[in-house]
Structures are given as structure tokens and as C-alpha cells.
Image: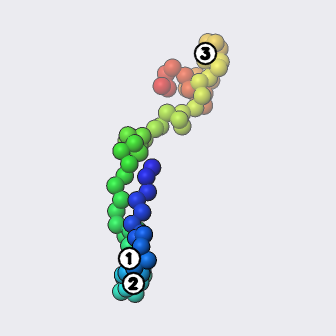
Amino acid sequence: MSIKDDMPRSDVNKEYYTQNMEREIQNSDGTRPVGMLGKAQNPSDMLLKLARTTPYYKRNRPHICSFWVKGECKRGEECPYRSDSSV
């Protein structure tokens, strides 16, 4: 991730930048961010590719019934664990 630094390098430009930021802070009502924080930044392309677009419900499913796998589950529909019929 790259961070863009807009802070000036020379002393004169730093003073000018500081004066402008102080004036912007004084003129603001304090409810919104000032300066670069107030501007929307473009999201990273990699983050957009990695972002999940749909909910992932499979992680919340119960484990498979070990007795059902052996063919010995006696609970049937009342079994709190997953079987082939509840997939």
C-alpha cells in the first residue's frame, strides 16, 4: 500500500500549507474531517478483488454427524448435526 504525502518539503511551503490548514480548521464546524481526511481515497484494486461480495453462510453450518456417516444415527430429523438430508 502506498501512502501519498502532500506535506511540502521547503520551509516556506510548509508555513503556507500550515496557515491554510489552520484557516480551514478554524472555518470548519468540527463535525467533518479537514484536509486529506475529508477527501475520499480510492480503494486499492487488490482489496476490491479480495472483498467478499456475498455472505458466507457455510462457516456457520453444523458439523457432519459422525453417527450418520457410519449409518448409525438414531436421531433422524432431530439430530442437531448435519446429515446429507440437511445440506
Crowd band around label 2 with a 10 angstrom C-alpha radius: few (<14), some (14–19), many (20+) = few
Identify the residue position indicated by label 1 in the image: 13
Residue 48 percent coordinates (x, y): 37, 44
Q: Earlier in the sequence, mark 2 or mark 3?
A: 2
User: Which residue does the numbered mark 3 point to in the structure image?
Assistant: 69
Q: CA distance from mark 1 to mark 2?
A: 10 Å
Q: Can you say whether 1 is above or below 79 in the image?
A: below
How far apart are labels 2 and 3 at the CA level? 72 Å
Position of residue 72 measured from the top left corner of the image (x, y, whole percent) = 65, 14
* Residue 22 picture quarter: bottom left
Dot 3: element: helix
* CB under 8 Å between discs 2 and 3: no
- Which numbered disc, 1 or 3, marks the residue closer to the eye? 1
What residue type is disc 2 on? Gln
Check disc 1: other Cα within 10 Å, few if <14, some if 14-19, many if 20+: few
Q: Which residue is mark 2?
A: 19
Say above or below: 24 vs 44: below
Quadrant in which residue 82 is drawn: top right
Please identify the residue farthest to the top as the structure is shown: 71
Residue for point 61% across, 17% down: 68
Marks 1 & 3, CB-CB < 8 Å contact: no
Mark 1 and mark 2 lie on one chain; the one further toward the N terminus is: 1
